[in-house]
Image (tube, grey):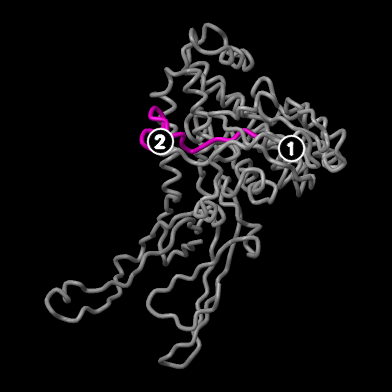
Amino acid sequence: MGEPGTVSGVYNITHKIDEDSPLYRYGSTTKGAIMALQVIFTALDPVYQAEVCAKISYTSENFVFGHRFGDMMRVDNASAARGKRARPTLDFSCFEELVEVPEYWEEEEAFFVNDSLPMENSERSPKVSDKIGILIGFGRASYGDEALDFDLPKTGMRAECCFALSVAMSLLEAGEDYEEYRTDLGNKAVWHKDVNEKLETPALRMANQEEWLAGTDNIIDTLAASNPLVRELAKIKPPDHVNGTNAYYEPHMTAFALGMVHANPETAPPMRGFLFKKFGCEPEWDKLRCEAHIQVKAREILERWESALAAQGDFLCGSAPGFLDCRVVTKLYLAFQLFESGLANLGAPFRSIAPLAYDYVNRFAKRDSWKRAFGPGRGLGPNSKIDIVTVRTICNKFAMIAPEIVDEVVIPALEKARKKKSERKRKPKLLRRNSAALCL
């Protein structure tokens, strides 16, 4: 923020909170975040040629994100209509007015402006390369399908498979890069089966080898055993008071189970029965009782996140992500998208149940490893941004395996995700200018 030479009328002073801002480390906006800020404004009065000073203090409750104060300057157009000179006036009736402004990631905006999203699957990979290669499942915000996308055109692809992305994150946080090969999860590459017979992702080929490895755990274990950089990352473990395996922190399976609650048990795929049995639903229970039971299980996992992060801090493994963080953060991100969109009914907003986990994902999304793996702009942001690419991809799966839930579950989730994307705004806290509201 530069220093204004002249301040007249009503002036909005803004400050961008990025990595260079002294406020960056206090960027949490969740309930309970503690922050105080004192602002001192000095200027020279042009009439009295004397210095004037104003001082005010703000706390976390006074911060308003995604808004600015409205313009109090008005022009008397009625006078102009009568042939008189229109004069500007100061309209105090607008004193409390907050104006919504769009929130977006600048790098995401540039990404779309440059129209650089890939539209097609990757070409067949070479048999051998001197770099690690990963086959990653990609999704689209719209497939141009009349049933789910209506009149929306087909859009470009973005990395989607949370399992493949956990491998990518492990490599990148270890300092190892890779060659990325795209396969559209809605229309997989013709050569995909040559790499993985089950048409699953991820698949990984080690540098200077022809064989493709399958299975997320197998791939990550192989990397930890054979790649020196990943081996070092694997040594970074959480302290004793943050315990548990990968599954201990993975809520995505409960999200899938909640998504299958409304499916017809007689025609649903075996996955529904498997998930219900996994989380202890009895065969005679109706869908509402199953949903309530699985909600409890989902919240228990999120409570584990809250307890671990409350004890540890920024990441499960310390001040920087460790091996466990890389393996579970992508599943947490996926679960959030299912919960927030309504594909899975958590029973309460994710952010109210797991505010520390919410901030955890946002911290991760600012890291170079996340931006490289996911692509720019793929975070939750301050207003629970729904990733339409993730939601659309999962909706496609749900629509195929349980078409009876399309009208009740799938379409409403898509509408919510698309509306959220188009708005990119945060509901205002109606605070008064003279009660120390600060727009950031």
In the picture of the structure, the residue carrying the numbered disc 2 is 415
Earlier residue among tags 2 and 1 = 1
Residues at marks 2 and 1, CA–CA distance in whole angstroms: 36 Å
Assess whether residue 138 is covered by the magenta stretch: yes
In this rendering, position of residue 436 left or right of residue 94: right
Q: Quadrant of the N terminus?
A: bottom right
- Given the image, on which type of amino acid does mark 1 rest? Gly
Residue visible at 44% across and 64% down? 435
In the picture of the structure, the residue carrying the numbered disc 1 is 133
Residue 208, quarter of picture: top right
Residue 214 at x, y percent in the picture = 74, 25
Residue 248 at x, y percent in the picture = 71, 28
- Eye-nearest disc, 2 or 1: 1
Q: Is residue 78 above or below residue 160?
A: below
In this rendering, position of residue 335 left or right of residue 215: left
Residue visible at 50% across and 23% down? 398
Residue 160 at x, y percent in the picture = 59, 36
Residue visible at 38% across and 24% down? 407
Assess whether residue 193 is covered by the magenta stretch: no
Q: What crowding class fits label 1: few (fewer than 14 Cα within 10 Å), some (14-19), or many (20 or more)?
A: many
Q: Nearer the viewer, residue 175 or 84?
A: 175
Q: Is residue 304 above or below residue 88?
A: above
The tag on residue 229 is none
Residue visible at 48% across and 34% down? 341
The reply to whether discs 2 and 1 touch (Cβ–Cβ < 8 Å) is no
| Magenta-drawn segment | 136-152
Q: Nearer the viewer, residue 252 or 60?
A: 252
